[in-house]
Image (cartoon, grey):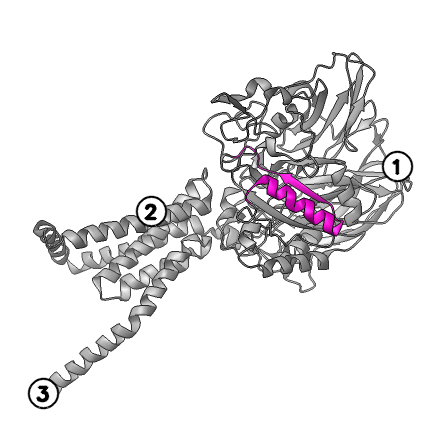
Amino acid sequence: MKMLSINRVFKNLHEKEWSHWWRIPRILLYIIGIVTFFFYFWSFIGLLIGIFYYIFFRNIAWKRNGVILSYSITFITLLVFYYKSFPPLNLALWSGLGIFLSFSILLLIVSITKRKMAVLKEFNSQILNLINILPKKVQSVLKMAIFITPLILWSYVSIDLEVMFDNHPSLLWVHAPSKVNLSETFELKVEAWDQFERLSAVYIGTIDFSLYSVNISLGSEIINPIADLPDTYTFRGQFIGSDIAYEIGDGKDNGMHNFEMSISTIGIHYVLVNDSVTSNTYYSNPIIVKNYTNNEQLIAWGDLHSHTELSDGTGTPEHSFYYARYIAGLEFVALTDHGEIMMWNPGTLDQLEKATNFAYRPNEFVTFHGIEWTQVKTGHYTCVFSGDELLKNPILSYMLIPTTQGLWDALDAFTENTEARALALPHHTTKKTYIQDWTYLNPKYVKIAEVSSVHGDFLFEQRNPLNYRGAIDPPPSYTHGSSIMDAFKMGYRMTLYSSGDNHDGHPGHSLSHTRAYIGHQRPYSIWLTRNEHPYPGGLTAVFVDNITREGVFTSLGYQRIYANSDHGRPILFFNINRTQVGDSSTLLVNNQNTHREINIFFAQDGAPVAQKSNAASITRNWMPNWDGTIEIMKNGMLWQSIDISAPIENITIIDTDPIVGATFEPNCLEIDGKYYINSYSDNPIDPSTLSTGGFDFYVIRVVGDNGRMTWAGPIWVEY
C-alpha cells in the first residue's frame, strides 16, 4: 500500500509537470489552428488540430475548444464554398472573428454568472448525467459522430476525387500562330486535355493531319492547298495520370507535342487533327498565310493580368512564365501581384523583377513588369511597364498611396526617372466591392480597359440586357456609371482588352472555371481566391511589328488590339472608311452626314469553348459550332445584329444616319446639390462634360452560339 501511494504521488507530480510544460505549446498550436481559417485547402490542418484536442485532451475546456475549432473551420469552409457574392478572404476573416468573438463573450458571461446561476449548474449536471446513463455503445457513437461530422462536411466541398484521379483525355486543343508567311516553317502545338482542361498525361492516342482552307478575298474553299503537314504521330504517355503533367519531364509527351509544318498556299487555313481516342476531328485557330512584307504586322496573343504566390495567387513567378509560354502558347504576359500584400515582404518585389527579366526572350516571348494597385473605393488599376525595371519605390499599395492622384504622381515620377512607359489598366469595373470611378481617370496612362476576365463581363452593367455573360459581385441595384460602355459615353477614349486575372498559376489558360479550382489542384495555394472565379480567363490580341517589349508595349499604348473571352484565338479586323482600331482609333469625316462604311472580317477559332463554371467539352461526332451573331454597338446601343453561320465572315454595312454623339448626363445622381456618376462616387462633376462631344463611337462584339465572345473597338467618328 505504501509503495502504491508513492507511485501515485510521482504520477501526479509527473502529470502536473507535463501539464505545466504543455500549457504554452498547447495555446500556440491552437492559435495555428485558428490561423488556418484563411488557408483554403490547408484549413484541414486546423481541423485536425481541433479533432486532436477533442480526442486526446482530458481537460473538458480544451476538449470543448477543440470541438469549436473543428466545427468553426468546417462552417467557414462551407460558407465560402456556397456563398459566392462576397470576397472569400473577407468572408473567412469576418465569419471566423465573429465565431470566436461570440464564443469568447459567451464564456465570459458564463464565467461571471455561473456562481449566481445554480440553475445553469444544475442544467449542466443534468446534461452530463443524461449522457452518462446512455449505453456505452451509444456514447461511443455520439463521441465518434462529434469528430467525424466536421471531417465529412469539410471533405465534401474540399476534396474532389475526379480532379485528383481522372486525367483521362477528353479533347484535343490545336494551336498555331495567327499569321504565317508563305512556305514558312512554323510550330503547331497539339495538347490532349482532360475534362478539367489540364494536360492528360495518360493520352496515348494516334493523330493525323489535314487542312481546311479558304480563299481570303472570295471566301470559297480551297480544294487542294499545298502544305507540308506533320506525319501521323502516336503520343507517349503515363500509366497513371497527373494534375500537373507538364512537370513530369521524363521525355514522354505527357499530353503535349509540338510539330513543325508549313503552308504554301495563300489563304486562311485551319489545321485539322483527327484523334483515335475520341474519334473526333479538332480544328486549330485560323492561320492567315500570305506573302508578308516588312511592313506587315504580326498578331501576338497575351495575358496582362495574372497573380502568383507572391501575393494572393498560386505558384512561383517562374512557374507562371513557363506555363504561359510553353503550355498556354502566349507571346507576351505580365505578372501583376498586389502591392498591398507584397509590401509586407519587400524582397518579393526584387524576386518578381528578377524572374520577369530572366524569362524575357526577345522575338520569342515578352514579359512585362507589373503590379496591381488595389484601391477599393475608386477601382483597381493593374500597372504594366515597358522597361526592365519594376516600380518598387514607392510600392504601389493603396496603404502607402491611398488616392488615385497619388498613383498618377507615382507613375509620373517613375516614367520621368527611368524613361520607361506605363499603362494603368482598370478591371472588373462593375463589381460592388471595387466599383470603378471613371471621373478619376488619367488618359495618359489609362488607354485600355479590361472587358472580361475570370470575374465576368464588364462592357455593360450586370443587369443590362446587353450583358449576356454577367459578372460576379453585382451591386444591390442597377448602377449607372461603372461599366466600360458608360465610360465611353462619358467621352473617355479607351480600347477593349481581355485578360485572365487568374490566381491559379495558369496565365493564358486559367482552370478556375472548372472543378480544378479545388485546393488540392497543383500548384498549391493557401489563398481562397480560386473559388470566386467562375469565368474562363480571356486573352488580348495585339498587332505588333515584332515580339519585343518595345514592339508589344508600343502597340498596346497605341491601342492596336482586340479581345477574346477564353483560350480561343479568332481573327478580327474592324475598320470604318479604312480607319482601324488603334493610333487614336479616330475617323475624321467632312460633315455630320458623311456616310460611314463599316467593314468587319472575322475568322472563328475552331477550338471547343470554355464558359462560366463549365470546362470546354465535346460530344461524340463533335463539330465546331460556327453559328453566332456579329453585333455593332453604336453610341452604347445595339445598332446592327448580323447572323453568321460560317467559320469566316466578311461583312460591310453603310451607316447613313447623321452623327449625333452620346452623353451620360441624364444618368448622373444629384446629392446635396452636387452631381455624381453614381452613389459610390465621391467626386462631384459637371454633368454637361460627360459626353462624346457630339461624335459617334462604334464597338464590335461577336457572340458565338457556343459561348465565345470577341470584342474590338471603339472607333470614334468626328467631323
Q: Between tags 2 and 3, which lies in front?
A: 2
Look at the image and give the residue range highlighted in magenta. 402-431
Q: Which mark is residue 266?
A: 1
**Residue at image x 64%, y 60%?**
350
Task: Kindly identify the amino acid type of the residue bearing the numbered disc 2.
Answer: Gly
Which element type, helix, strand or loop, lies under badge 3? helix
- Tell me if mark 2 has few (under 14), some (14-19) or many (20+) residues whose alpha carbon lies within 10 angstroms of its own: few
Do the numbered discs 2 and 3 sit on residues whose CB atoms are within 8 Å? no
**Residue under pointer 3:** 2
Residue 196: percent from left, percent from top: 57, 47
Front residue of 601/478: it is 478
**Residue under pointer 2:** 98
Front residue of 334/6: it is 334
Which element type, helix, strand or loop, lies under badge 1? loop
**Residue at image x 22%, y 76%?**
15
**Cα separation between marks 2 and 3:** 54 Å
Residue 118: percent from left, percent from top: 8, 52
Residue 498: percent from left, percent from top: 66, 38
